[in-house]
Amino acid sequence: MSSIFYIDGEFVRSDDASIPANDLAILRGYGVFDFMRTYGGKPFHLDWHLKRLERSARLIDLDLPVSLDDIRGITLETLAHNHYPEANVRIVVTGGTSDDNITPNGGARLLVMVTPWKPLPASWYEDGIKIITHHTDRYLPEAKTINYIPAILALKKARQQNAVDAIYIDGAGHALEGTTTNLFAFFGDRLVTPGQNVLLGITRQTILDLASDRFQVEVTDLLLADLRKADEVFISSSNKEVCPVRQIDDQIVATGVPGPNTHFLMEQFAKMSVAYAQS
């Protein structure tokens, strides 16, 4: 079954969706995007995602082709053209065409792609997942750009080691975030997540809000050496939500099973998503 996408002013079948080959998104990897899922058919914190899309575009000096209000309306209309119980929504702004194939001409294109949401393996949440570490330095990690070469290489390395994700480690030994996820660690009842040189995830912020009444929350640097000593570790993203980690590289995290604090946040997030769907 084909989805209906919005492509630069038109609603088209996903099988027929295309943009010009000389768009800077293709020639130079110049563009930004944002991604979310729905609960009860409603895009989760759409306005937050749009604000982040705007910030990403600003960080790479890319002008949005229409206003955020217009993008919001187009996104909701694209969802209405599809009939999935739950969906993934990807909003992309490309660099547009260029006379010299490198300098933007101000003709950015807007794409909105809706696809069916599919649940992830239950074993990830019951048993926890394995992640690996990947040493690299990245450019503009605060911007959600379409340049995912570092992530693709890191994730390929993770899959080769039967891991779900790879956590970036910088030159100073700080654990930052995963290829498409944010990183959290519990030290007792103290919850730590990195706050610099990472993408500020919408799910991440939701988790921080849920945790603030019960735990001591710290947004601060997290050394890999300290991460390896954590009592509990989990990652988060729009599609993974709160996903417990049982192993980092060859080292088992604490007892090797998802801990009580992570379980609490998993339950709270589930309750929150049900309430969001019903609101």
Image (tube, grey):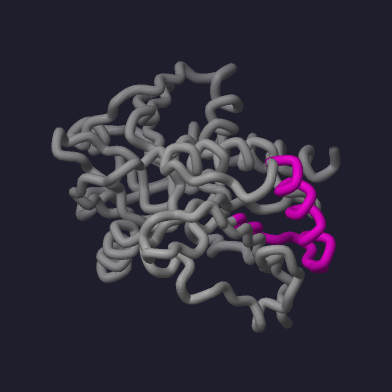
Query: In the rendering, at what x and y percent does residue 75 appear?
Result: 74, 54
Q: Nearer the viewer, residue 156 or 6?
A: 6
The residue segment tinted magenta is 68-91
- Camera-side residue of 60 and 206: 60
In the figure, 133 relative to 176: above or below? below
In the figure, residue 222 lies in which quadrant? Answer: top left
Which residue is pictured at 52% across the width and 36% down the height? 55
Residue 102 x, y percent position in the rendering: 36, 60
| Numbered-mark total | 0
Left or right side of 213 for 98: left
Residue nearer the viewer, 143 or 98? 98
Res 175 quadrant in image: top left
- At a point 55% along the width and 19% down the height, the residue shown is 212
Q: Nearer the viewer, residue 81 or 62?
A: 62
Q: Residue at x 71, y 42 (%)?
A: 273
User: Residue 113, image x and y in percent?
Assistant: 65, 64
Q: Quadrant of the N terminus?
A: bottom right
Q: Quadrant of the C terminus?
A: top right
Q: Is 142 left or right of 7, judged from the image as shown?
A: left
Q: Is residue 92 magenta?
A: no
Q: Quadrant of residue 177?
A: top left
Residue 79: in magenta span: yes
Query: Looking at the image, which residue sits at the far front?
Result: 99
Q: Is 192 displayed left or right of 161 in the figure? A: right
Q: Is residue 172 visible?
A: yes
Q: Is residue 163 visible?
A: no
Relative to 144, residue 103 above or below = below
In the image, taking residue 80 as reference, residue 112 lies left or right, namely: left
